[in-house]
Image (tube, rainbow, N blue to C red):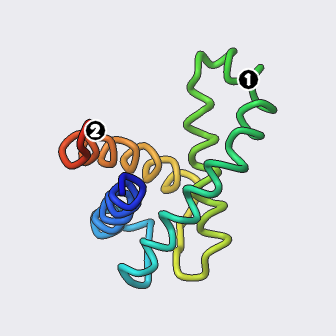
Amino acid sequence: MNFIIRLLITAISAFLLSKILSGVHFDSFGATIIFAIVLGLLNLVVKPVLSILSLPITILTLGLFSFVINALIIMLAAYVMGSMQVDGFWWALLFSILLSLVTSAFSTIFESND
């Protein structure tokens, strides 16, 4: 049940952010649910590989390069999905930062501690 709640929180957050940010576009709310699933899969499979490969530069930048990795994951999700469009790297970076913040805020409100 927690997985479904996190999936819906991510989808709702992405949908709201796409209405605020002019550089991120979804075709429909259903596309944001698919985006949440694709993002979860990419975070499960691709992100650990990128994090390990970029460990030296992440250490040199004191962890700030992890924002770049998150933006690359967002751009990869947009590439995989036909119903999402990101207008550039900077929009993906801003979207990934805001998505993390909004999802975290919603998760603290709606998820139970069971």
Looking at the rendered image, the disc whose residue lies closer to the viewer, 1 or 2, is 2
Q: Quadrant of residue 27?
A: bottom left
Quadrant of the snapshot with the C terminus: top left
Identify the image quadrant of residue 23. Answer: bottom left
Residue that label 2 marks? 114
What percent of the width, then of the height, locates residue 108? 24, 39
Element assignment for label 2: loop
Indicate which disc residue 92 carries: none
Residue occupying the point 64% across, 41% down: 69
Counting residues from the start of the chain, the first of labels 1 and 2 encountered is 1
Q: Is residue 9 above or below residue 24?
A: above
Q: CA distance from mark 1 to mark 2?
A: 38 Å
- In the image, taking residue 15 as reference, residue 94 lies left or right, namely right
Q: Amino acid at mark 2?
A: Asp
| Badge 2 density bin: few <14, some 14–19, many ≥20, Cα 10 Å | few
Answer left or right for 80 relative to 9.
right
Amino acid marked by disc 1: Ile
Nearest to the observer: residue 60 or residue 100:
100
Coordinates of residue 84 in the picture (x, y in percent): 52, 75
Name the quarter where the N terminus is drawn.
bottom left
Residue 56 or residue 48, whichever sits in front: 48
Task: Identify the residue at image location x=26%, y=36%.
Answer: 113
Q: Quadrant of residue 13?
A: bottom left
Q: Which mark is residue 57?
A: 1
Q: How many discs mark residues in the rendered view?
A: 2
